[in-house]
Image (tube, rainbow, N blue to C red):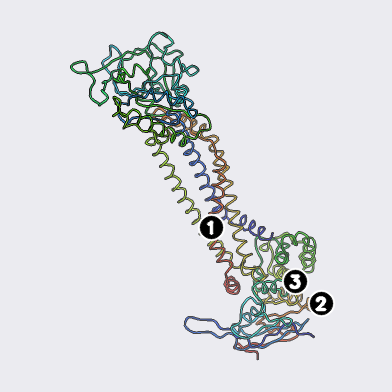
């Protein structure tokens, strides 16, 4: 009881305590803010990748694709663990406008919009047809025309806040997509002067996945059109990938393992058939494995950040250690008094450890509250800074980030708080032990001098 | 009178660089219950060292200290803490009050140390009453909420005496209690101590001032580490 009283009086009686608590508060503030924003970005990025991919992907690495994909997709559909599948054709080509001399390289994905929206989050990325993604390739100005969905950044039109500017209805726009059709062995499917397949599409919608590459380079077209452009229309017909959404309750890892088994059996059954050589390149991967090249750098950054925070924790420990060594030095006379009135070593150490706990708890509380308030208003603050000083954390005209993530994870915040208090106790442990071990006579005589 | 404290053959030396400085060389003394004894001697004669050993703040290199028939060197750490808390009260030359606590809290502190939190809650009222009585006795009833640095030297020393008495110790050990005070204030403090002794408080005081020493019931003279 008196120990806490003394600890509290020491805390409020010394300016250096406020300094130590401020250091802890600052560290906690930084960790809470950066962890929240960083975790939010990573979580958001993972979710976007998950939405883009589905739960599991059966895909060939090459542009050639693989045969019998439709058959395997039908087999998957009959499995109870699968809720939806979407066969896709991936290709690269040139996009231009009729009459225009300019064109640019794009990637295209042939999909069945209805199935693809069930297997992935494609439907939610649309602007004009978000409510009915089945009509994604039906331009509102001409439903009988063959439409295409264009990555939102290919269309341009972002304001400074990062919001995309859309017209009320999709503008009438004719686009020409050209590609080299390939044989199943990877050679050019055509010879002479007719090497390239071209097809005209009408702009029907934009897709905003929140991922830089698909939004900046991808055109979505009907599956069969993509097959023709890529030369995958057979026989036997080929596809590039099958995106799978598992039924509710099926874990991604377990589902992927079962699909892997099904694929091995399926591929073995097609061993003797034409085009079987394309099956060797096919891999069954969970969405995380499939998108690891995208996700891994961000996760690495997060791990690096966590490491930096551990360093920050060590610095906090060191600050507290130094402050408490100074405090114990200044309080040596008090330690002599404590001994003279019969306080035990444990009780004397307890006074200083209690003092450290107060520094930790108050510092953490201030840091957490400060961090929470800052995060609560971070987007408004950034908006104000942009309005008055044209400063943005991320240039929205460049980065695929809408709002700064500010959803505070309270278990993480609690862990940060406990870690901060623990750091203070750890930092104060040696000085407190030193205080407890001081020789009463010596410190009383020294303080007399 | 019953003997309350007995020291036999106390030796104490300190290392001073490569040599050893012998401060106490076989000191024998005893203090009786209700006595007012003074250890007098020149500066550096080992008076304070002897007082610290008698109050178990320091350990002798040789010899024994008995308090009411119990040898202090046989007590463990907990026993020595209890001894310092309940059986003796220290008054220092430089008062040694805690600046973070007010007078009432300073006086209550040894009593708080002596009780567990639950015990403290139950006895809090009694302890505060006793502290107030002591502060009144010392003429500080109107200063109880003041911090030590707001008081004069004499007031601080009287507070230190009140703190030393809060647990009703059998023996009060005072190390030059007037040494840092002007003569008038020093005489006031001495009067307080003599009054306490008249009420039955055993008192062992260290001083180098002959005028003060001669006012005690018995003077133990220490020179060159020995009783003379």
List x then y, in percent, for residue A136.
Answer: 43, 16
| Residues behind callouts 1 and 2 on a single chain | no
Quadrant position of the N terminus of chain B in the picture:
bottom right
Q: How many C-alpha atoms fall within 10 Å of the one at disc 2: few (<14), some, or many (≥20)? A: few
List x then y, in percent, for residue A162.
Answer: 44, 26
The residue lying furthest to the bottom in this view is B228
Instruction: For marks 1 and 2, give the CA distance.
Output: 50 Å
Query: Subunit of mark 1?
Result: A
List x then y, in percent, for residue A306.
Answer: 46, 46
Instruction: For marks 3 and 1, give the CA distance.
Output: 38 Å
Quadrant position of the C terminus of chain B in the picture:
bottom right
Instruction: For marks 3 and 2, give the CA distance.
Output: 13 Å
| Residues behind callouts 3 and 1 on a single chain | no
Query: Subunit of mark 3?
Result: B
The residue lying furthest to the left in this view is A192
The residue indicated by pointer 3 is B165
List x then y, in percent, for residue A200.
Answer: 32, 13
The residue indicated by pointer 1 is A426
Q: Nearer the viewer, residue B7 or A241?
A: A241
Which disc is residue B199 wearing? 2
**Badge 3 vs badge 2, beta-carbon distance below 8 Å:** no
């Amino acid at each position: 009881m008196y120990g806490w009283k003394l600890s509290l009086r020491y805390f409020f009686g010394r300016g250096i305590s406020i300094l130590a608590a401020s250091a802890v508060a600052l560290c906690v503030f930084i960790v809470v803010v950066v962890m929240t924003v960083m975790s939010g970005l990573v979580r958001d990025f993972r979710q976007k990748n998950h939405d883009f991919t589905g739960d599991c992907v059966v895909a060939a690495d090459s542009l050639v694709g693989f045969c019998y994909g439709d058959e395997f997709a039908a087999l998957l559909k009959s499995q109870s663990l699968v809720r939806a599948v979407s066969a896709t054709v991936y290709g690269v080509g040139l996009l231009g406008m009729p009459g225009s001399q300019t064109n640019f390289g794009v990637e295209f994905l042939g999909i069945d919009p209805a199935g693809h929206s069930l297997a992935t989050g494609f439907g939610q990325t649309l602007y004009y047809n978000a409510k009915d993604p089945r009509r994604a390739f039906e331009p509102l100005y001409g439903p009988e025309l063959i439409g295409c969905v264009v990555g939102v950044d290919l269309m341009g039109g972002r304001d400074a806040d990062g919001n995309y500017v859309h017209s009320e209805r999709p503008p009438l726009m004719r686009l020409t997509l050209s590609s080299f059709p390939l044989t199943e062995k990877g050679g050019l499917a055509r010879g002479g002067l007719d090497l390239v397949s071209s097809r005209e599409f009408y702009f029907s919608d934009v897709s905003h996945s929140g991922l830089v590459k698909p939004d900046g380079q991808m055109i979505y077209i009907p599956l069969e059109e993509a097959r023709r452009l890529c030369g995958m229309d057979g026989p036997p017909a080929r596809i590039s990938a099958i995106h799978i959404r598992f039924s509710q309750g099926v874990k991604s890892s377990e589902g992927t393992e079962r699909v892997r088994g099904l694929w091995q059996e399926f591929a073995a059954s097609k061993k003797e058939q034409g085009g079987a050589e394309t099956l060797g390149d096919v891999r069954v991967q969970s969405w995380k494995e499939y998108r690891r090249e995208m996700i891994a750098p961000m996760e690495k950054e997060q791990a690096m950040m966590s490491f930096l925070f551990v360093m920050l924790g060590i610095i906090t420990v060191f600050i507290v250690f130094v402050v408490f060594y100074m405090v114990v030095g200044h309080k040596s006379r008090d330690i002599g008094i404590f001994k003279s009135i019969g306080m035990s070593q444990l009780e004397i150490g307890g006074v200083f450890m209690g003092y450290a706990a107060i520094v930790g708890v108050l510092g953490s509380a201030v840091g957490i509250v400060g961090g929470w308030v800052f995060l609560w208003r971070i987007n408004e603050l950034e908006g104000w800074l942009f309005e008055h000083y044209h400063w943005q954390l991320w240039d929205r005209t460049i980065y695929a980030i809408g709002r700064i993530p500010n959803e505070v994870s309270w278990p993480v915040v609690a862990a940060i708080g406990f870690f901060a208090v623990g750091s203070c106790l750890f930092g104060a442990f040696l000085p407190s032990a030193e205080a407890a071990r001081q020789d009463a006579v010596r410190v009383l005589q020294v303080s007399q001098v | 009178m019953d003997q309350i404290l007995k020291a036999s053959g106390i030796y104490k030396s300190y290392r001073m660089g490569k040599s050893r400085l012998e401060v106490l060389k076989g000191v024998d003394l005893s203090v009786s219950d209700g006595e007012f004894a003074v250890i007098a001697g020149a500066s550096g004669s080992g008076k304070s060292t002897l007082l610290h050993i008698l109050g178990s703040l320091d350990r002798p290199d040789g010899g024994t200290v008995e308090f009411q028939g119990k040898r202090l060197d046989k007590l463990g750490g907990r026993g020595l803490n209890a001894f310092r808390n309940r059986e003796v009260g220290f008054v220092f030359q430089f008062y040694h009050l805690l600046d973070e606590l007010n007078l009432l809290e300073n006086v209550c502190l040894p009593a708080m140390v002596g009780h567990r939190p639950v015990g403290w809650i139950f006895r809090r009222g009694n302890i505060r009453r006793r502290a107030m009585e002591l502060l009144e006795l010392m003429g500080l009833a109107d200063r109880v909420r003041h911090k030590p640095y707001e008081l004069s030297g004499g007031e601080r020393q009287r507070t230190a005496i009140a703190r030393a008495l809060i647990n009703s110790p059998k023996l009060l050990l005072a190390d030059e209690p007037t040494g840092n005070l002007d003569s008038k204030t020093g005489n006031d403090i001495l009067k307080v101590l003599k009054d306490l002794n008249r009420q039955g408080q055993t008192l062992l005081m260290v001083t180098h001032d002959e005028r003060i020493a001669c006012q005690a019931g018995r003077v133990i003279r220490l020179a060159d580490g020995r009783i003379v």
